[in-house]
Image (cartoon, helix red, strand yellow):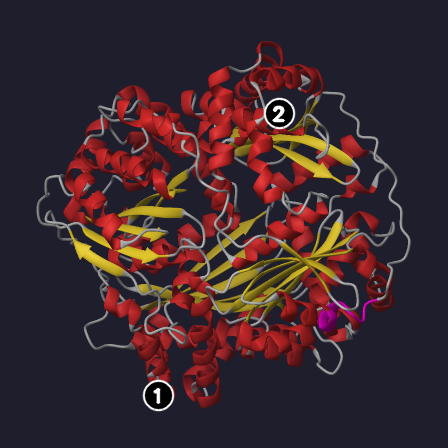
Amino acid sequence: MRILFLILGLALFGGQAQAGVFNPQSFMLKNGMQVVLIPNNRVPVVHHMVWYRVGSADEPAGKSGIAHFFEHLMFKGTKKLAPGEFSKVVAKNGGRDNAFTYYDYTGYYQTVAKDRLPIVMEMEADRMTNLTLTAEVIEPERQVILEERRQRTDNNPSAQLREQISTAQYMNHPYRIPVIGWAHEIEDLSLEDLNQFYKKWYAPNNAVLVVEGDITLEELRPLAEKYYGVIHKGGDYERIRPSEPPAHADRRVIKQDQRVRQDSIQRSYLAPSYGSVEKGDTSPYALQVLENILGGGATSRLYRSLVIDQKIADSAGFYYSPTMLDQSTMTFWASAKNGVSIDKVEAALKREIDLLIEKGVSQDEVLRAQKTLVNEAVFARDNLGTAAQVLGNALAIGMSIDQVESWPEAIKAVSRDDVNKALRAVLKDQYSTTALLLSKKEDS
Amino acid sequence: MRYLIIALITFFALPAYALAPVQEVVSEKGIKAWLIEDHTNPIVALRFSFRGGSALDPAGKEGLARLASATMDEGADKWDSQGFQSRLEDLSITLRFEAGMDSFGGRVLTLRENLDAAAEMLNGALTAPRFDTEPVERIRSQILADLRQREEDPDAIAALALYRKIFGDHPYARGSKGTLNGVASVTPSDLHGFVKDRLGKNNLIVGVSGDITPDQLKDLLDKVFGSLPQTAKDWQIAKADPQFKGGLQVINKAVPQSSILFAQKGIERHDEDFYPAYVLNYILGGGGFSSRLYEEVREKRGLVYSVYSYLADYDSAELWMAGAGTQNARVKETLDVVRAEWKKAATEGVSAQEVKDAKTYLTGSFALRFKSSDTIAAILVGMQKDDLPIDFLKTRNELVEAVTPEDVNRVAKKLLKPDQLMTVVVGQPEGL
């Protein structure tokens, strides 16, 4: 999911050539489902997405993994469709489909020829409320998900470490729990748990329909009304989550593993996000500018200092995930050059952070970053699916279309002072987690 | 399912694409490119490829092409490494090289307004890369770190072991990423020699899409490639003699999920049975959520998260590959099911309905590939690499459409060899 945030970060800053970034059109169905259209007529194809405002951070305590497990089950049949048939019908119509789950949302999508859009809309609308789950279909799928966990996490020491970092970084907020869930809790999720989750969160007024492609609003509106507009509105939705208390100590996570052949370090800090800030607080914009200055490739600060000048690291960078509903993180990282001790790399990284707090960033750095970010928008518009991803993501965390479209202005308005204030507010030791991934000799 | 019937019986009226036709553009200096004009966005995507890839790395210098690909953009002509990279970044130009087994390629993605600068930078990188000590040593260290980490990656271990068994002494056995010793041994003079010997106009393929006219492209081609040597140094790669003797190799690795890889002989891209084989592969394991392997291995039994098969086509060898990952306790069951499906397809064939569904997907989804200027440029390079005709985009769906169930079943019987399926498992499988 990291890629997604990059795209969002980059794409949102556009608007040089056109008035807005993606120039979407939007309307609301009577049942409260928002519809967004981004025209793109390069090929007679449409990308159709439904985003639900529910993710792993909305799971009941002790039921980790249920949002993701449920996402898999959305393919397991309704009154009209047999288990597994959904994707087969999409394929038989020359389309592709898939789905994804993250902390704050769950999304389902199909890419099809324009004239097949009604078919996927009918099926997607159908499974919003008509899913028929049985114990028979959930058991093999549970095994699939446990294999997915092994593949993504347990077979990969750096992914295992990332899980541990989150549990240390977040003391109370559910971002501490992995999206895919803990294996022992995945094993215990019951059919009843899953059905309750479905009933609680899946309804048109908790969903956003995003269509990008070769279609007009005049064509889309009647289809949206016909398929989604007839679904009964659900209850009122409120996402109440535990929040972080004040922190009093910095944290340290160390993983030694025989499978690690290059030592590396990352240091993350709790940081504001677009979803978490009060109205008028522009710090996420400033931190995105900071991200470009620190982590934007071969000429960025950290790479130049640790890799090129000091020659102690093979790579170094920085990333920030701004598009979250609640408080997010930003992370400094570096991987040690062969033969260089991780302590030395850590000390150098710490010096860079101290320097940043003390001196801040320069005016030149800010201007250069702003220009780079603005240019990226044109590239984002060129790829079918990017706009839908960006807008769906933004709306799922409570941002507005206007916020997305006016991003270029907001980013251009960021001053050096804004960046320095924002970074100084974030870079507090007691809100940091330092993680080391270290090699380990056999049998030690 | 009634509501679908109408859709399914209507044949795809969809043209493969609503794009401008592919044009062949030849510059004054004789550089040829295929172009799809598209003035929707003010950007230009250029992809290029030189025939001859890492399989040509000399023995003892395995990784030469890879190291070259990662250092040619680290300083050229009047720009040192930081100068080169800063200019790219300031102008939002993406410029990258990539070494494959049989080709050495690259791409440029730029705003139209910076096209001249992009051309100048790419020309510099292709004809006057500096290979200064600092960037070469820096990148070498990064590649060595990656190669060391790959020694711990179950998927990479499985692939290398499989290729070693199949290709023996042939360079394909080394994979395309290089070796620790090879990368450590490459000198700056090797890198200069690589650029001088391997990048000639005669082995160059170019594909372009975006906001550019044929006349502008002619200029661009000469600016970028005009000063390349007329011909690359003569090279020959031994014809591979891949061995498919079946059998299972287990490589012990302490991981909770075993990586499983299978391979048997594949099919040449221009073989008259290629399209039936392509349809067959879709049915067997190529078809995302619809293949037989997906159904039997994942959907019914919950053995894996991913299971797949694909046709791999190298210049001098063809493979039919399949892969899966499962917990150590269920490796045997997974192997059994995959082999049974392989055998079943070979002996019993597939149904007419499966062939029909496969064809509907393969033809209907073709337009979905044309997502961005960059992917379109890549498709244009791929077509030329495979020696396909310039009107291929128009005829391709007809070629798929012409495949009959009889073709598929004849090819299944002829090509699928369950006894020759080579298998590698990396993990701690139980009960084998």
Q: Residue at x 34, y 57 (%)?
A: A39
> Could you say which is closer to the camera, residue B60 or residue B31?
B31
Q: What is the x, y in percent for residue B370?
A: 51, 50
As drawn, is A170 to the left or to the right of B126? left
Chain letter of disc 2 in the image: B
Q: What is the x, y in percent for residue A333?
A: 50, 66
Give the residues drawn in magenta, as a range. B222-228
Answer whether residue B224 is magenta in the image: yes
* In this view, B29 is above or below A133: below
Q: Amino acid at mark 1?
A: Asp
Q: Which residue is mark 2?
A: B276
Give SS at disc 2: helix
Whole-Å distance between the Cαs marked 2 and 1?
Answer: 64 Å
Within 10 angstroms of label 2, few (less than 14), some, or many (20 or more) residues? many
Q: Residue at x 37, y 48 (%)?
A: A47
Q: Residue at x 31, y 51 (%)?
A: A211
